[in-house]
Each structure stands twice: as structure tokens, then as C-alpha cells.
Image: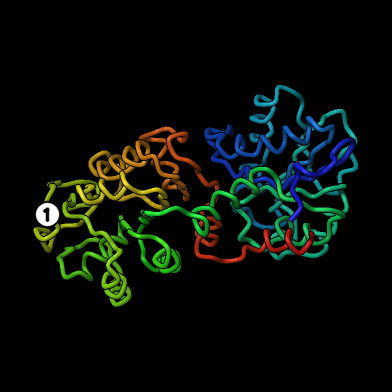
Amino acid sequence: MNNLLDLNLNNKNLIIRVDMNVPIKDGAVYDRTRILASMPTVNHALEQGAKVLLVSHLGRPKEGVFDEKLSLRPVVESLKNIVEEEVDLIASPHDPSIFNSKARIQVLENIRFFDGEKSNSPALGKLLGSLCDIYVFDAFGTSHREQASTHSAITYSNEACAGILLQNEIASLTKALNKYEGPYTAVIGGSKVSTKLELIKNINTKADHIVVGGGIANTFIKAAGFEVGISLFEESMLGIAKELLDGGKIILPQKVVTSLTFEGSEVAKKNINEVQKDEMILDQLLSEEMLQIINTSKTILWNGPLGVFENSLFEQGTKELSLAIAQSKAFSIAGGGETVSAINKFINSDDVSYCSTGGGAFLEFMEGRDLPSIKALKLKN
């Protein structure tokens, strides 16, 4: 696929599809992580003499209806502070001021306000593609969505390419998927095996060890014949979990943290063979085996926490995991919203080799799927 860094951008008008779906509180952005992740592409375009129109979604508004609470105005204000220059908010893709103002950076209002975005409308895609000289796709977090700004706009554009963030995502995830160095350890947490079954199956063919966490671990613990009490687990996944356990790569915890309630009542640390029928497992502690595996790994994939780390009563396992990965010399890649939140809480993002900006896109890529936006870019080339 075409790469932004290889193109002549001087005096060109660029639409950059970014992922600035950031949390807004009291009318202001309170976490700029995704905005900052897009800035290398934006800055490169400006340095090369281009003008840019940024396109992003925010939240899940009703299509075709303007919702002030989901306007990108707070994003524009945040961008102004970052770039220290004027940034225009453009109300509509039909606005004649697009690329016709003094501002080098413009931001189109929430793309999901416009009819045809979610349905991958060719009409909206053609309109977006016709507005610019080059359509730059840099929103990895939405690359698994076949929508107008993530798919048909690429198809109908004059020229399309991958932005810097997307290139970095593809390179890092491909390294963990196909170009890894062993020993390879995967840490896969979350509430349900079913939502990550394809990831576990795919990684099971590559990794030497898989540490499971959260509700996923509970299902495997139950499949191994231990009591999980009233813990979250999936009855329908027990057979598959048993098959995976028989493969010898799944590492179960030896000690867990239990409680009588989700909020934390009669919290106790105990061996997995000591869990009672009225208890729930809300955290798991790193065993010496897990620590040894992480310390000797050359590649680590991390997706999901080990417990309900948002509650300090159940944060120990995820905190221990974060610190162990931070101290590891392995190439480590982390993805998923909860994983990034854990990193931000317990360590620095620089302590992990690469933090992916994708949630669902990260999972689908690591499952081995060909994501629609990336496929469209490859076909465009």
C-alpha cells in the first residue's frame, strides 16, 4: 500500500481519517491520548507544505442528527492547544470553506452526524474522496469498520495512503503475529472466552505460553475441575477450554483473590482449590511460574487485565503483571482499552514496546483477519 512518507505533499490538500474518539467531560477533552497519537501524521503533512482536513467520529450519535454533546468542538479546542495555531471546525462536507481558509488544519464535524457513514455509502465516500488530493487513512482503531470514511472514501479517492500511525500499528502487530522471536508469551484477559476465542485459537498456534485472566481464567479454572463459586464464567465454553488446556500452553493461577460481593466483602487470598461455593474470583496473583515465563520471554502479547483492577481490592494481579512486563527485556505489545488503562495506572506507556490504539481492530488483526480499511488501501495501490 502507499505510504504517506513516500509521497510529495507540497501544496496538496489532504483529508486524514483519524481516530479522535476521545472521552469528553464537562465539554472538554480529559484524555488526549488518541489525539496525540495522530499528531505525527498531521505534523508531517504540515511540515511538507500540505493543508489538512481531519475526519473522525465521536461516540454513537443517531445518524443524520446533530448532537451538541457529541460535537468535535472540544477536540478542536484541544488541538489548538497542542499545535498552538488556529484550527477550523467545518460543519459539513459541503462547506465551501474546506481548504479555503487561512487555517492549515480543519476538522470536519463528527462524521457520524452525516447520512451514509455507517452504511458505507458510495455517495458519501465519493464526496469525501473528491474533496482532497490525497486521502490518508490513519485510524487503525476503526479499520475493522466498513464505513464511508474508513472504506468507500479510500476506494473513490484520487489517491490514498496509510498514515504514520497506521504504518506503525501494522508493523508492530505483524511482528507479534508473524515475525516474533521465541519464547513467546501471550496474556489474554477479559470477561468472556467467547469474545476472544478466535484470538486464543490463533495465538495458541504461535505462543509457547498463554496466561489467562479475568472471567476468561474462571472458565479455564472451572474446566480444570476447580470450584469457582459464583464467579463469572461461560458454561458453553467449558468444552473448548478443556481442549485448550489439554494442549499444555494455558497457564492457570495458583492463588486468587475472592470476595462474597463484586464490591468487596470478606476479601481473601487463597489457593484455587480453596474457593467456596458462595465466593467469586475477582483477581489472580502472579505465580513464580508466570513471573519466570515473563522474565525469559522474547515476545509478549498483552490483551486484558487479570482482575477487576479498577477496585484497589482487586488490583494486585494486574499491577504485578504490569510491573513484570515493564521490567522485561522482551518485545512487548499491548492492546485494548482496559489494558491501556492498566498501563496508565501502574506503569508508563514507554515501559511497553508498543501500545496499540485499537480495541476491536487489534483483536481482529491478531486473529489473522484482513481488515476492510487495510484491504481497501492495498487494492488502491
Its colouring scheme is: rainbow
Identify which residue, 186 or 46, lies in the foreground. 186
* Rendering quarter of residue 102: top right
Mark 1 burial class by Cα count in 10 Å: few <14, some 14-19, many 20+: few
Is residue 110 at least partly visible in the picture?
no
Task: Classify mark 1: helix, strand or loop.
Answer: strand
Up-down relation of residue 291 to residue 191 (above or below): above
Tell me where residue 242 appears, x and y as whole percent: 27, 74
Counting the numbered discs, the total is 1
Using residue 332 as the reference point, say whether residue 155 is left or right of it.
right
Q: What quarter of the picture does the N terminus occupy?
A: bottom right
Task: State the residue in front, 302 or 21.
Answer: 302
Residue 20 visible somewhere in the drawing? yes
Q: Residue 160: where, in percent of width, then height?
A: 79, 53
Residue 302's place in the image compared with 101, above or below, is below
Q: Amino acid at mark 1?
A: Asn
Q: Is residue 151 left or right of residue 361?
A: right
> Mark 1 = which residue?
271
Image spot of residue 232 (x, y percent): 27, 62
| Left or right of 138 in this view: 34 | left
Where residue 263 sits in the image (x, y, percent)?
A: 24, 47
Quadrant where the C terminus lies?
Answer: bottom right
Which residue in the rendered view is the most extreme toward the top?
A: 84
Q: Residue at x 30, y 40 (%)?
A: 319
Is 264 in front, or is 20? 20
Q: Which residue is found at the position 29% from the left and 63% from the top? A: 250
Residue at x-position 47% and y-position 49%: 335
